[in-house]
Image (cartoon, rainbow, N blue to C red):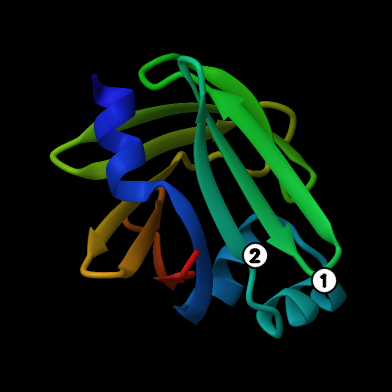
Amino acid sequence: MAHQDFIEKFGGKWKQEKTENFEEYFKIMDLNIILRKLMMKVSPTEEYKLDGDYVVTINSVGPTSNQNKFKLNEEFEEERMGKKMKSLCRFEDGKLIITSTSVDNPAIKPQTVTIEKITDDQTLTTIVVGDNDLVCKRYFKRVPE
């Protein structure tokens, strides 16, 4: 049931409109300056859909895309900006909550918690690194079908 509730709320495509404090997040993720500057100039698209009991997310930037497939409430490994992460996604109170820790980069010690919340046709994604060491936000608008 949680999967169906999730897809009813988040299903479809979302286009990033703006960010707050996001370049600092790229620094913590150890992205080099050229990639950081490039990533700050693009507006990625996120898509959410279901494949049986799995949630599928597709993040697209220009001609490249990254896909993750996972079950809610089950730990999985993903690659984020070239870094292997161990993540757990939960859908609670209408929000998607993702808790992630680095697997292969000891320099990225703080855990990140990502909270995605929808208001009207906008998604607010808040990323908290460590114990509020860094808070950044991304705003997405639903793409009409």
Q: Is residue 21 visible?
A: yes
* Residue located 55% across and 51% down the image: 47
Q: Judge left or right: residue 36 versus residue 45.
A: right
In space, the residues marked 1 and 2 are separated at their CA atoms by 9 Å
Q: Are marks 1 and 2 in contact (CB under 8 Å)?
A: yes
Would you identify the image quadrant in which residue 89 lies? top left
Give the number of the disc on residue 35: 1
Count of numbered badges drawn on the protein: 2
Determine the residue positioned at 56% across, 39% down: 109
| Residue 86 coordinates in the image, percent (x, y) | 57, 25
Task: Name the N-terminal-most of marks 1 and 2.
Answer: 2
Disc number at residue 26? 2
Please give the name of the residue rendered at 49% of the width and 42% of the height, measured from the top-left corner: 110
Kind of residue indicated by mark 1:
Leu
Mark 2 surroundings within 10 Å by alpha-carbon count, few (fewer than 14), some (14 through 19), many (20 or more): some
State the image quarter where residue 61 is shown: bottom right
